[in-house]
Amino acid sequence: MSKKKKNKKKFTRKLLHKYRMVILNEDTFEERYSLKLTRLNVFVLVTTSAILLVAATTFIIAFTPLREYIPGYSSPQLKEQAAELAYQTDSLQNVLKLNNQFLGSIKGVLSGDLQTSDLNRDSIAKFSQDNLEVEVIPPSRADSLLREEVALEDKYNILPGATDNINFSLFPPVKGTITEGYDAEEKHYAIDVVIPKNSPVKSVADGRVIFAEWTTETGYVIIVKHDYGLISVYKHNASLTKEQGDFVKAGEVVATAGNTGEYTTGPHLHFELWNEGNPVNPTDYIDFE
């Protein structure tokens, strides 16, 4: 027992034993600075310095912008921008998907390999709507008469939600006899109008030419994109008067009628009309006679 007490006293004396740290001039051995220290003082000083260093580091990381330079930390502004960019990217992906479907429909105009079930840009939304249970209410006689009157008034209006304040109508590209009409079941998404060779072919509305080239099957072809998602197609022309990228006015000559291409039997105009990527019957909106 006495041995343990002696060891404890010896350890205490070592902690409290005083030392002197002296700084001397190397050349003259002049004493410049001296400091009395004990092992306990050194331990307390080192421990206090470590605690202060940890506290200062914690404060810098938690409350100052310097934490942005530490790997793994980012500013709130960067996080907010990242979230906003993620939302924009998702929106752009949806728009890109719709545009790809729309461009695919335009390519199908030239190939003629489209099916009506594949032409709806909003097919997913439409499918969801079709699955809803809707109670069918038979229309009254007054409602039927009103619908018939409105249908007659808008016979040549291609815009389903058009009102009087929208000044938009379609100009007949040519005047002549229709030899083959629109038939979606037979994949003939156009009408064939017989006209004399070199007759002027006119644009049905204001728009920009998005295609003007020669094709083996349909000869000289020109396609014009109009407002409200409309596209008009003119095939089997003898020549084209406009180039891709040109802006045309309604009634402006874009080609001359002819008999070019493999799929033709005489001078005529093969005319197609597309609305939002879907083929429509041109005779429902344009008077060709």
Image: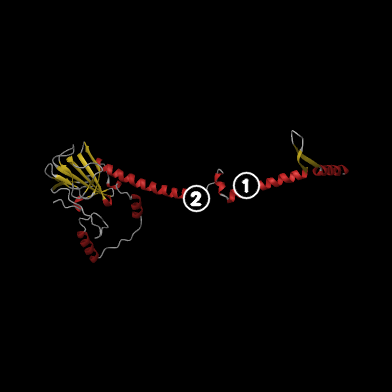
Closer-to-camera residue (68/93): 68
Quick one: label 1 or label 2, which is nearer the N terminus? Answer: 1
- The local secondary structure at tag 1 comes to helix
Query: Which residue was labeled with disc 2?
Result: 77
> Whole-percent x and y of residue 99?
33, 46
Q: Quadrant of the N terminus?
A: top right
Q: Residues within 10 Å of mark 1 (few under 14, many from 20)?
A: few
Name the residue tied to disc 1. Answer: 57
Q: Residue furthest left?
A: 196
Residue 263: percent from left, percent from top: 18, 38
Identify the residue at image location x=88%, y=43%. 2
| Residue sitting at the far bottom | 142
Residue 130: horizontal and vertical position, in percent? 33, 54
Instruction: Please identify the residue farthest to the top as the structure is shown.
Output: 27
Residue at 61%, 50% (x, y): give it.
59
Rendered residue at 23%/39% (across/down)? 213
Q: Residue at x 58, y 51 (%)?
A: 63
Q: Residue furthest front?
A: 28
Give left or right: position of 12 versus 243.
right
In this rendering, the count of numbered labels is 2
The quarter of the displayed image where residue 113 is located: top left
Amino acid type assigned to the residue bearing label 1 in the image: Thr
